Image (cartoon, grey):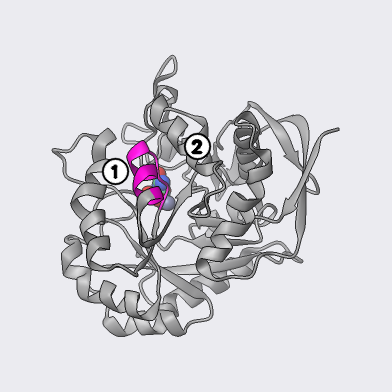
Amino acid sequence: METLTIIQPDDLHLHLRDGAALSSVVAATASQFARAMVMPNLNPPVTTVEQALAYRNRILDSLPSGSRFEPLMTLYLTDNTRADEIAAVADSEHVYAFKYYPAGATTNSDRGVMDLTKAYPLIERMEKLGVPLLVHGEVTDVDVDTFDREQVFIDRLLAPLLRRFTTLKLVFEHITTAQAVQFVTESTGNIAATITPQHLLYNRNSLFNRGLRPHAYCLPVLKRETHRQAVVRAATSNNPRFFLGTDSAPHARLAKENSCGCAGIYSAPCAIELYAEVFEAAGKLDHLEGFASRFGAQFYGLPVNKVFITLVKQDWQVPESFPFADTEIVPIRAGETCHWKLLTNEK
Ligand code: NCD
Ligand code: ZN
């Protein structure tokens, strides 16, 4: 049987939620990934190191016994972020970065930044102290077409930002377009990008496949096939600027199957298997380890994990749903087949 053994990967963009929802999903990630960069968009958001450390403890308390999973915490940048919070992050052992959401861009982003230029004094401190800024790279203007919001963000906000802060450590999160790939590839700055499984596997037709498919809806929204191909080329290129971040974003079934459905795809139960499928289809399985297990750690200055995982080429069916708090959640590829299977993972 064909097998693939790689250094255990890290998920450098993850939503874990809180309370009963957190307890429902954290084990799925911990069974695949050694560490994850945990997004701060709780309600209310995680805005201080103190809150992030409390949240980290809740995550650790929700883990199955014996798990060695390490949550890497982030803070939510708001119009009210205090300058000394940046120094606190720089000094913190467990908090790694600030996350920038444009106000109103996505789930629980109402407290996001209204005008990025107003945050420039804070960003200047991040640059000085080497604190990374993680960006949700979409404009939110209602007059900009949803499918263009990433490329307009590059032109209007990201390019000017990086011209001004030339040594800022920045991660362009969950990129979805050829323009983002080109921007990250050609940048002279200290920047990188995360890539999700859904943007590697699916194009926007998946949203309208014989009917409206709420479980394929995430933000940034899936794009056309040419963009998907550009993102696959980037992920599989062995360029250390592109690394794994699932953006696994759990929402209860009824929050998605709704007249105003939430954005977010839950991929934690089969994430590494889906990435393996993409790399295999591209003929680049030998580049999976860099993307999944090395480049993210290198960017954040973390040691590469010492544990290995093994994937086997074996079909298995993803469950139609999983328990989620007092309800249920529908994962990516629900009821369909995965072609790789993570060993040691009871499914
Ligand atoms: C995320 C969520 O639900 O928290 N949703 C998503 O579609 N990706 C928020 C985000 O990362 O945009
Ligand atoms: Zn996200």
Does the beta carbon of the residue at mark 1 sit less than 8 Å from ligand 1?
Answer: no
Mark 1 — residue? 150
For disc 1, the neighbor class at 10 Å (few under 14, some 14 to 19, many from 20) is many
Q: Residue at x 56, y 74 (%)?
A: 57
Sequence-first disc among 2 and 1:
1
Q: Position of residue 209 (x, y in %)?
A: 44, 18
Estimate the x, y position of residue 161 in percent, counting from the top left: 24, 61
Residue at 60% over, 56% down: 26
Q: Mark 2 near mark 1, Cβ–Cβ under 8 Å?
A: no
Say few, some or many: other residues with alpha carbon within 10 Å of mark 2 (under 14 / 14 to 19 / 20 or more): some
In the displayed orientation, state which residue is furthest to the top. Answer: 210
Whether 30 is drawn above or below 215: the answer is: below
Residue 111 visible within the image: no
User: Which label sits on residue 233?
Assistant: 2
**Residue 73, numbered label:** none
Cα distance, mark 2 to mark 1?
18 Å
Query: Where, by quadrant of the figure, is residue 41 drawn?
Result: bottom left
The main secondary structure of the magenta stretch is: helix
Q: Amino acid at mark 2?
A: Arg
Q: Which of the image's four quarters has the C terminus?
A: top right
Tell me the magenta residue range: 173-185
Using the image as rendered, state which of residue 311 and residue 24 is in the foreground. Answer: 311
* Mark 1 element type: helix
**Visible residue check, residue 333:** yes
Percent position (x, y) of residue 10? 61, 57
In the image, farthest residue toward the right? 1
Q: Which SS class for mark 2? A: helix
